[in-house]
Image (spheres, rainbow, N blue to C red):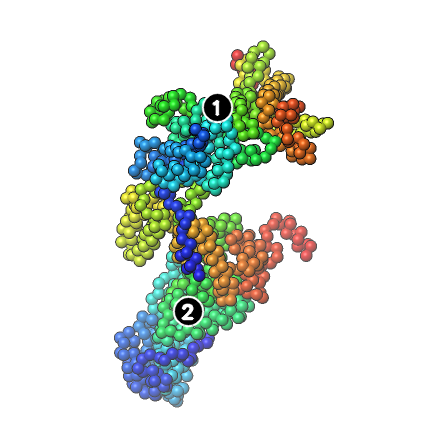
Amino acid sequence: MWFQETSKRKQIGVFDNMLNETVENELQQNIDMIRTITGNSTDIVIREFLLGQEQEIPAGIFFVGGMTDEEMIQKLLVQSATQLTIPSSYSREDVLAYICKKIATAGKVKRIKKWHELFLALMSGEAILLIDGVAEALSMEARGGEYRAIEEPSTQLSIRGSREGFTESLATNIAMVRRRIQNPYLWLESIKIGEVTHTNVSIMYIKGIASDEVVEEVRNRLQRICMDGILESGYIEQLIEDKTFTTFPTIYHTERPDSVAANLLEGRIAIFMEGTPFVLIVPALFIQFFQAVEDYYARFDIATALRFLRVLVFFISLIAPSAYIAMTTFHQEMIPTQLVIAVAAQRESVPFPAFVEAMMMEVTFEILREAGVRLPRAVGQAVSIVGALVIGQAAVEAGFVSSAMVIVVSITAIASFATPSFAIAISARLIRFLLMILAALFGFYGILIGIILMTLHLCSLRSFGVPYMAPMAPFISTNVGDTFVRFPMWALKERPHLINQTNVVRQGSNQRPKPTNELEKEGDNH
Amino acid sequence: MLIHVILLSGCWSKKELTELAFVIGVGVDKKGGKYMITLQVVNPGNVAGATQKGGGSSGLPVTLYTSTGNTLVEASRKVSEKISRLTYYAHTNLIVIGEELAREGIKEVFDAIERNPQFRTTASVIIARQCTAKELLSVLTPIDKIPTNQMIKTLELTEKVWGENLNVHAGEVIEILSLGGKEVVMSSFRIAGNKMIGEQQNNLQSIEPYTFLHAGELAVFQKGKLISWMSGEQARGVLWLLNKIHQTAVTIDWQRTKEAISYKVVRSKTKVTAKINNGKPIISVMISMEGDIGEVLVPMDLTDPNNISLLEKKLQQEIQKEVQNTILYAQSKKSDIFGFGEVVHRLYPNEWKQLKKNWNDQYFSRLQVKVNVHAFIRRTGLRNKPYF
């Protein structure tokens, strides 16, 4: 465990100087100090009691209500106040050492001298024991309190596969992954980020599979963060990503422990954070955003078909409206005669150019979607009813848009929802509008320019030193089996090469299922 | 710089759908030494299937515009005096040439069509038989509301299942006109019924339209000029020789009964090869086909293999006769519509240099053509012996 000792920023608060001092001898003085610094906050529980049987020593136990396991503290109190017999020969310092060894209910016990350490422990949910006459405190691991139960992940559902999703509790989340990878080489490092919030952040990787340089890089980038607070892993993502000015996500995030486990096995590094179910995974590749955990649970042919579908869907959500604009304003010859006449007939009553029409509908749709996301469920239904009118027959009958446009908008919307990763779907949404403008100016030529520029940009991106478009650009033939296609399990012999350069082989050489007699024959040969 | 690229270029080729007049068919006539073009323009709102409010099905699906000019381009530009939208030719699927103009020569017509990037070379070309192109384009049709579509579909269908008409694309015509060794042959359409009624909506109010469009004879050209017509079995012979027969029906005699048995051709292939003997080209044609017995009007036993092979032999003779008839007729007109010259050119490029100068007059008209037919009866239908 490494710990951020020095603050890069000036600390807040009026009592900062006092925090650097050590704990006093007098219990009463200490209690006063805690009261002053926390401003008598009512959720800080201060319980004074007499310690031990033979020798009764005034002591105090402190904890934050709601963040600790109250039952455990209860036991602790009972044990230390009634069952503990302290020999009279012991000095007060000895008593502290004795308790440290004797009290068994708490998981982790630590001796603390400095005030700031004491408060860090107290605020993170540990119980603090202070004994009169000792200038030292004992912090005891007693974290607890209420958390959301483990539920099905709401953003990454799957038909087949684990139903567990991460919760807001860091310890629970870590345990969920460790349960999947039961190996001592699954290493975990923790850091507190946020000058005010002191948020617990952990990085997890498999020693020997993950590249040491990338781990070091992640560590450095996390340590560089100096902010008052981080409240969601999105904060970290924005502070450690390679390039800010891009619409494409260069860090993957997931709510599924099985996804994290799979990524760790490929040599990636997971960043957990207290207070959010979203775990970051670095380095991320473009192709990763088109993959779902289920691809690996389903058989390869089905998984491959689905991946093709997703790439198709991404392109539809990207260029459907701009293709409509380009075809109806520049390239009418491309549309079959019957269709062009039908579309022309619909457009007869629409007063706007195709571009304005498309823009209007797309913006309306984005408004609807945004309204639907934020609204409480009861009102949400009303929005969807009104939405069906706005993007639907009513709009067509009112002569605002043509029915062809309604279809284009709908197919774009469906395509955008079918993209497995929300992060990439949202970037497609932005680029879509750019392409629409290009299509209105130059037709298909403009769309092509836009797509070429997008590809160039994608190829220039890196995620923690790994080219974003790998393994397509640069082309790594051994890894292509797990991109737009997914080869059978036994053919995926090697881990992604750029993510871990050394330890790449992940399975035996004869994993292909065969009839038993053939397997025996092979066995004889070897 | 990127901003400049966007701002300076503008959208010069941008045209909204509502600014375009879709020309679906073009007719070309000659009138008083000037070209007269007829444009059949789609009225999108009135075409069935386009269920947008405003139009309804009361109006006519197409409108005709005509204008005259010294050249086709001049005439087509002058149409703008009458029409509110930009004429757009990318969806022009049919080019109609008036019979009169066809007799004068069609070579000049296709230059404008080939030069214009909007025109498709896959547009079909037909001749208006016994009428002007304008009259042909003025007839309203049932089922396929756009008359042009009606004609193209009719042509495609009849070529496929009957085989006496030929759907020729503008690109093919241009190719034939620009190369030697082959002459143009294309289908014609004529108006059956009263021309005046055909122009009106009334035409469609009757269960049998008063006036309708009828795919007619094949127009035979020589050096880009219409010289003759071919119809019936003669026309089918052309399609045999051009390897264009997909399906058709051949009727043969059996014993003493005339036209007793129908044979449905299902697939057919024609191979034409050439040989040069003593400086004289000899063409041999091999037609092989496969088909079913479609109809038997005399009592006979089709389970007997001897009968079948006899039938096949008769079929071969019948078709051979038909094809040879066609060749003789074309030779008498001195028009190599079958592209025999092209075959010779391909196989004997050196000898062709001498032959090509007088191909039609001297060589083609006296050409020796061997026709071999191989007909095969695959099935006899669901019945073996007729019930009578």
Q: Residue at x 33, y 51 (%)?
A: A360
- Most extreme residue toward the top is B256
Q: Secondary structure at mark 2?
A: helix
Is residue A82 depicted above or below B137 in this figure? below
Q: Residue at x 41, y 83 (%)?
A: A97
Is residue A139 depicted above or below B134 in this figure? below
Cα separation, mark 2 vs mark 1, equals: 78 Å
Q: Which residue is mark 2?
A: A239
> Label 2 amino acid?
Leu
Q: Residues within 10 Å of mark 1 (few under 14, many from 20)?
A: many
Quadrant assignment for the N terminus of chain B: bottom left
Question: Pointer 1 indicates a residue of which chain?
Answer: B
Residue A526 lies, in percent from the top left, at 68, 57
Q: Residue at x 50, y 60 (%)?
A: A459
> Label 1 amino acid?
Gly
**A67 or B335: nearer the eye?**
B335
- Most extreme residue toward the right is B278
Question: Pointer 2 indicates a residue of which chain?
Answer: A
**A264 or B298: nearer the eye?**
B298
Q: Which mark is residue B216?
A: 1
Residue A493 lies, in percent from the top left, at 58, 58
The reply, left or right, for residue B80 in relation to residue A259 is left
Q: Secondary structure at mark 1?
A: strand
Is residue B342 depicted above or below B327 in this figure? below
Residue B321 lies, in percent from the top left, at 61, 19
The reply, left or right, for residue A295 in relation to residue A395 is right
Residue A16 lies, in percent from the top left, at 34, 82
The answer to which image quadrant residue A195 occupies is bottom left
The answer to which image quadrant residue A18 occupies is bottom left
